[in-house]
Amino acid sequence: MTEDDDLVSRVLARDQRAGARMITLIENDAPGAASRLAELFPHTGRAAVIGVTGPPGAGKSTLVEGMVRAWRDRGRTVGVLAVDPSSPFTGGAILGDRIRMASLTGDPGVYVRSMASRAHLGGLAEATPAAVRVLDAMGMDVIVVETVGVGQSEIAIAGTADCTVLVTMPGAGDGIQAMKAGVLEIGDVFVVNKADREGALRTRRELNAMLRMQDRTPRPVVLLTKADMGDGVEQVVRQVEEFLDTRRGSGQLQKRRLRHLEREALELIGAQARRRTLATLDQATIDELSEALWERRQDPATVAARALAALQWADNDC
């Protein structure tokens, strides 16, 4: 028997080492990872999933660390998935968030995992939703997902989290304006961190003004924090829990989670279709399609349709 033979039972027994191994298998798309994840699925759906996003330098990791401590004071177990940017040259990542949260790693009720984005868009790694599911199956009460920190493009977290906390800081200026058409619309709780800096109140006013322009009831609150000092962090946690309680009571939380699962399934259909297409097409067909593009006889949409037609889906065990 190998170490991986009883992986599912060990994850369900809250073995953090087994959870780490399971996430690694998922990230590497290893044989057997999908079937094990399917076994875990009936044991999920209980954890509160909190997304934390915002521009670089806003202090997301410091805020997350404080939030984790607040939940631990309440007796909750917490998992943290910190997504770090990957190098465009090596594919590796510095995994700095895990270093910054090193003080949490000695607590058996906390599990911190860094994930490289591997050039996946939207501020998350492709394997993030599956990794959330592993931590959920491990019995974590709260799972915090901290995104890369690239600003407007980080809307993918809204398709994973039960509640999204958007963190900014005084003096963001143009950054806040850029949020208006992007992540500003997916935040459920807003935080102006580093509130001891000049311009904190002005930044809060600007955010409130933008939120008043949106048709959202109730309107999200904007909180001030000094996460490095611990100031305001407890209020953020209370606001997150109040948001979840309200959504749970109205049935909106359950509907949001169903939409997340539907979106994930559709994305996986697209990813699997792409992999199967590339694996099935022979080199002669690829060359023919490339030639049609090069000579501008056919546009990319027509070439894509031809590639899909060449697969003969019905004859390929679909």
Image: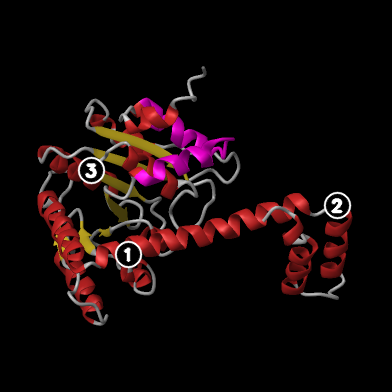
The magenta region covers 17-42
User: Tell me, what colour scheme is on the image?
Assistant: secondary structure
Quick one: label 2 or label 1, which is nearer the N terminus?
1
- Residue 27 against residue 121 in the figure, above or below: above
- Report the residue at 52% width, 59% height from top: 267
Quick one: label 3 or label 2, which is nearer the N terminus?
3
Residue occupied by mark 2? 283
Q: Is residue 128 left or right of residue 214?
A: right
Q: Position of residue 181 (x, y in %)?
A: 38, 74
The amino acid type of the residue labelled 2 equals: Gln
Separation of marks 2 and 1 at Cα, in angstroms = 43 Å
Give whichever of 111, 41 is nearer the camera: 41
Q: Position of residue 220 (x, y in %)?
A: 19, 69
Q: Secondary structure at mark 3?
A: loop
Residue occupied by mark 1? 256
Q: Position of residue 299 (x, y in %)?
A: 77, 74
